[in-house]
Amino acid sequence: MNVIECQNLDVRLGSRIILSRLNLEIKENQFIGIFGPNGSGKTTFMKALLGIIPCAENKIKILGNSPYKARKQIGYIPQYRDMESFQLAGREFIATSIRGHKWGLPFLTKQDLYHIDAVLDHVHAKELAGVPLSEMSGGQRQRLLLAQALLGNPQLIIMDEPFSNLDPKWVKIILSLLKELQERRGLTILLSTHDLNPLMKVMDQVICIGNQKAILGDVNQVMTSDVLTQLYGFPIEVVKTDQHLFVTTAC
Amino acid sequence: MFSLEFMQTAFIASGIVAVICGLIGYFLLIRRETFAGHALSHVGFAGATGASLIGVSPFLGLLIFSLCAGGLIGAIGPKLKDRDIAIGLVLSTSMGLGLLFLHFYTRYASQVTGLLFGNVFAVDTQTLYGLIILSIVCCIAMLFFMRPLLFASLQPDLAEAKGLSLRRVSIFFLGLVACVTAACVQVTGVLLTFSLMVGPAAVARQLSKTVWKGIFLSIFLALAETWGGIIIAWITDYPVSFWISLLSFVTYILSLLVSKNLSFYKKARKVN
Ligand SMILES: Nc1ncnc2c1ncn2[C@@H]1O[C@H](COP(=O)(O)OP(=O)(O)OP(=O)(O)O)[C@@H](O)[C@H]1O
Ligand SMILES: [Mg+2]
């Protein structure tokens, strides 16, 4: 079954069209990078998949359902989070999403605690359970958020620029963690970024967004001078070496 | 001191107010909406003076005005650019409006001071019943509402993705804040609500690693500060609100020192 299916999808913000006539299908157990310049609509596209931005009915199917119905099967890590100012411990923070949308008091059952420990273990971050958010490094916070995204056994994980303020060492750690999780659980991972280079080894396909359009394909197919020039509407040059990829304007 | 009826009433009334201030204040802080909370009490001032002018209970006028303002601020939502400027302007306009109402209503100057700076010793039975009803409403609301409120406050984007309406949460919460403000004004007055609604919660947030500890510490401190304030005021014969605001300030400064020392101590331990 397709994990994500978009048919002739238009995404608007207010009166502005961000993406138009988008068609794509993503199968299970895929690691997909989303690439595009600032303001191209990466976040907007993800929010459409999550059902936060309403779109015309039946244009998006997540695991065969509408985004709203599928929301429990999606783990999400938003783009920017200001977490430094909280003294709350890591466990306490991720626990807020357990039944977070339901009425009641934020009590945790034994089973909840067990689940939290399990996901922390999956990202090799058990020691973060008791550490206050304000004392964690960026990489530790990102791992914590990844653990939270795994709560409730999602089929699909959407990460919005998780690497924007991490150094290369942490990017590598998180990426190998993601790859491990993907292979072990057959997850589909959607990850947006400004720099595809670190993803070259782990990524199965790439979505390129720009100019209200989006193209899905293998890296070698999509990340070429011709395709990107057409997508962005001005000359773009892609230079490839063995493991690296440089996207520049051609003039 | 405790055998006097007005003292008993003062203790009960301020106790009720402290509990709901500590509780709601904690969420006001983690949502970073302290300024909105501050503004609501000032908007309430216009309501209270307006109500006295037309012969209605000032408490009721205050409640209605701040409820309306709370709903409005919630509906605007946090995403609007320069929201604090808009709130600030509404705040000062309402104070101005309150002044105009006072201009027409020149009889009781002491009532005005009471409204601005609070007077727990003047709480009558009718107001006490009002406070009890308000606090019951707040507690019942929180019983149902606390989990989604916490989720939406700490992780708004994720909460939205899980199907929560941030706008509804915001409107509902600020409605609650309006109720608590109206109650708080009876103790600290319009101008000093920050002391009771924000001070204890700020300390609690600084010192606690879990939400429940934070909430209980916030309530405990609010209670200690109000009751402590009343007792000291009784002994010294200075105004209660002065003591409450001073206690709140001192506790805050102390907590800063304590948490600084704590983190310093931890760092020193890590190095060794
Ligand atoms: N409420 C809104 N109404 C209209 N346009 C908006 C609104 N919010 C954002 N936009 C525009 O939508 C476009 C897409 O924004 P989006 O945040 O999806 O881009 P992005 O690719 O995630 O950018 P970045 O790399 O900076 O995160 C931007 O050009 C932005 O200016
Ligand atoms: Mg973005």
Image (cartoon, coloured by chain):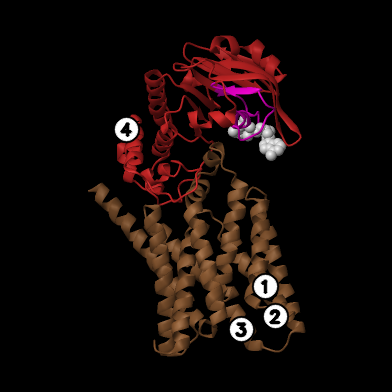
Instruction: Confirm or deny contact between disc 1 and disc 3 (CB under 8 A).
Output: no
Which one is nearer the viewer's eye here, B145 or B244?
B145
Is A57 included in the stretch rendered in magenta? yes
Alpha carbon of mark 2 to alpha carbon of mark 4: how far?
62 Å
Alpha carbon of mark 2 to alpha carbon of mark 1: how far?
8 Å
Q: Tell me the kind of residue under disc 2.
A: Ser
Residue at 39 percent of width and 23 percent of height: A181
Among the chains pictured, the one given brown colouring is B
Instruction: Decide: few, some or many residues near mark 2? Use Cα within 10 Å; few <14, some 14-19, many ≥20.
Output: some
Q: Which mark is residue B113?
A: 3
- Give the number of callouts: 4
Secondary structure at numbered mark 1 = helix
Instruction: Decide: few, some or many residues near mark 4? Use Cα within 10 Å; few <14, some 14-19, many ≥20.
Output: some
Would you place residue B239 above or below residue A50 in this image?
A: below
Is B157 included in the stretch rendered in magenta? no
Q: Is residue B118 visible?
A: no
Instruction: Confirm or deny contact between disc 1 and disc 4 (CB under 8 A).
Output: no
Alpha carbon of mark 1 to alpha carbon of mark 3: how far?
17 Å
Q: Which mark is residue A121?
A: 4
Residue depth check, mark 1 versus mark 3: number of the one nearer the observer: 1
Among the chains pictured, the one given red colouring is A
Secondary structure at numbered mark 2 = helix
From the image, tell me which residue sits under label 2: B52
Instruction: Confirm or deny contact between disc 2 and disc 1 (CB under 8 A).
Output: yes
From the image, tell me which residue sits under label 1: B61
Q: Which residues are magenta?
A: A34-63
Kindly identify which chain the residue marked by label 1 belongs to.
B
